[in-house]
Image (cartoon, helix red, strand yellow):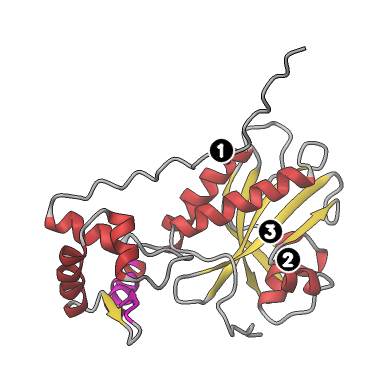
Amino acid sequence: MRSTPAASHTPRTPPARTAPTPPIGVLERGIAVLECFREDRLRLELREFAELTGLDKATLLRLLGVLQNARMVQRAENGQYTLGPALLHMGMLYRGSVDLGARLQPVLRAVMEQTGETVAFYVRSGDERVCLYREHTQSEMRPHVEPGTRLPLAAGGASAHILLYYTGGHTAQAAHIARHGYVITRSERVPEMASIALPVFDGDGSFAGSLVVMGLASRHSREAQLAALDLAREQLALQGFASQAPQGWKPHA
């Protein structure tokens, strides 16, 4: 009987990465350089700019020189580039021109639309938590939370634990928050209600409050809650917020 040749196990060469198309206009090129920076790319070398933008190194050096003069980027002694102080100044001007609600409402709306659950933002006021903004789910079975609603922190609820922890108060969830940066509660304050809450920090590192996603425990599973958490973090970042404390940050009572 004729034997069949063994199949080749030579590993396939991965497809070559397509180089990005470099922008044409000078302004577009400068913007492309700045947009190379992200939370996981705070320090970049010249070759990395080239890989990310498709621009040649000579062009990049000229652009980076202009951005350095404008204090929009800085160059370290090791040759790496970081964002410059002028962008912080512009960010502060932006914050002054747009109020908190105008930035938070799109976050709440996006999370509500994609999760189908009610989303709210709370701040601490003495021994209470106050709802500043909310987006209701379209479901008939939902928590009824309105802006201005005040609830005692001692009554519990995911956002209450977050507010207590990040304002120097006592909460039994402190260890979990310190480790994971969020809280899940199920039927703690209201029977059959499940909620997941996380902190919201503004661009200057100040603690703003707590965002919470609430739904019936029967349909808001732990997996759904964690998916809502990831979505909330993503949407907050798009509006210039952070969902974890800056390094070295300490709560103020």
Query: Which x, y percent locates residue 30?
Result: 20, 62
Question: Farthest residue in the front direction?
Answer: 1
For this orientation, the residue located farthest to the bottom is 77
Label 2 residue SS: helix
Sequence-first tag of 2 and 1 = 1
In the rendered image, residue 96 lying in the magenta stretch gets the answer no
Considering the numbered disc 3 on the image, is that residue within a helix, a strand or a loop? strand
Q: Amino acid at mark 1?
A: Glu
- Of residues 246 and 104, the one nearer the viewer is 246
Question: Dividing the picture into quarters, in which one does residue 124 lie?
Answer: bottom right
- Numbered label attached to residue 197: 3
Q: Please, what is the three-letter code of the amino acid marked with disc 2?
A: Ala
Residue at position x 65%, y 57% from top? 149
The residue nearer to you, when weighing 89 against 7, is 7
Q: Residue at x 72, y 66 (%)?
A: 180
Q: Residue furthest top?
A: 1
Instruction: Give the residue pinned by disc 1.
Output: 113
Residue 181 placed where, x, y %? Answer: 68, 67
Q: Is residue 43 left or right of residue 71?
A: right
Per the rendered image, the range of residues in magenta is 79-94
Label 1, label 3: how many angstroms apart (C-alpha)? Answer: 17 Å
Provide the secondary structure element on which disc 1 rests: helix
Q: Residues within 10 Å of mark 3 (few under 14, many from 20)?
A: many
Which residue is located at x 33 percent, y 56 percent?
52
Q: Are marks 2 and 1 in contact (CB under 8 Å)?
A: no
Residue drawn at x 57%, y 41% is: 11
* Left or right: residue 130 compared with residue 224: left
